[in-house]
Amino acid sequence: MKRAKRFCYEFLQERRAITKLNDEWVIADGLPGEIGYALDFPWKASLPRVETRMYLEQYGAGRDVWIGKSLYRLPLVNNDLYHNMAKADFKCFQRSCQLEWHGINKWYAENDLEVYGVTHKSALTAFFLAAANIFEPNRADERLGWARTAVLAEAISSRLNSLEESEDGLLSTLDQLIGSLAPDSTASGSLREAWKKWLLTWTSKERCHNAIPEENTAPLIIRTEGPDLQKAEELDRQVDMEMQKLALLVLQNYNAADRLSNRTFLDVVKSFCYIAHCSPETVDRHIFMVMFDNLIR
């Protein structure tokens, strides 16, 4: 499989270099773009909503024509109804994103997080990463929890990097966040323990000055989605494993609760891969396309 993957990748790169990505058996305008996206964004760095947004432009709907002994169409594969339904669904997602981002932006301003070194751009990126992975309407709390946890972790990191004491306002914001994410005492205690462990990474003698412990922020976000300490620690030990093994862990787990937690862990890891893989300009373009661009063809 690895040899086949390498061969296919190199072959398609060569074809793209000479602008010959069209299939001789189908007339599809979006095929070069679809292949190009797969070549530019490996699976481990491809976010679901980014991939969907790109595919909405690449999907040919009723325009695609297949070539056999004659020209023909496959209405069960390519049709305008599917395309229109997908575009309508994505526009609903965009409206939800904009409303939720308005709430995050208000929370950001009310708690003066800019004072603690969190820029408006980084807050937007944090929400985008959450929304691009957890996009289901019924998972809004998880999406917002992810975004706020990432933003607050950056604020605390920036404050500690500046060697200044945390102010009461930042601690109060953290306390409110934990209370909103984990209303019962057991879950709240578990989540507070996760934040405590994360903060203790800053007292490590091995920590380099001005370094942000992002490798510890990922498990912290996972605890926001499902505060099971034992499970989070177990997954934390596996974070350095290959992405294929992590995906296998998700797919082979048939327990619904465990599967959701494992899936969220995979999403968070992929979001870090995405940021490492993409240029700032690419991230900005994706944020606009996924959250704000209503000009879906």
Image: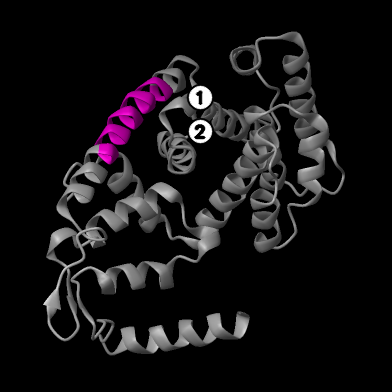
Q: Which residue is mark 1?
A: 113
| Whether residue 281 is situated above or below residue 161 in the rendered picture | below
| Whether residue 242 is situated above or below residue 165 in the rendered picture | below
Quarter of the figure that contains the N terminus:
bottom right
In the rendered image, residue 289, in percent from the top left (x then y), is placed at 28, 48
In the rendered image, residue 95, in percent from the top left (x then y), is placed at 28, 30
**Disc 2, SS:** loop
Q: Residue furthest right?
A: 205
Say which label, 1 or 2, has the lower sequence index: 1
Whether residue 142 is visible: yes
* Magenta segment: 89-105
- Could you tell me what secondary structure mostly forms the magenta stretch? helix
Q: Residue at x 12, y 78 (%)?
A: 71
Whether residue 195 appears in magenta in the rendering, the answer is: no
Q: Residue 118: which numbered mark, if any?
A: 2
In the rendered image, residue 296, in percent from the top left (x then y), is placed at 19, 48
CA neighbours of label 1 inside 10 A, class few (<14), some (14 to 19), many (20+): many
**Disc 1, SS:** helix
Q: Residue furthest front?
A: 69
| Whether residue 132 is situated above or below residue 113 in the rendered picture | below
Instruction: State which quadrant residue 280 falls in.
Output: bottom left
In depth, the one of 165 and 72 nearer the eye is: 72
| Amino acid on which the number 1 mark rests in the picture | Leu
In depth, the one of 250 and 52 nearer the eye is: 250
Q: Residue at x 31, y 51 (%)?
A: 53
In depth, the one of 282 and 97 nearer the eye is: 97
Instruction: State which quadrant residue 39 falls in.
Output: bottom left
Alpha-carbon span between mark 1 and mark 2 = 6 Å
Q: Residue 214: which numbered mark, if any?
A: none
Circle 1/circle 2 CB separation < 8 Å: yes
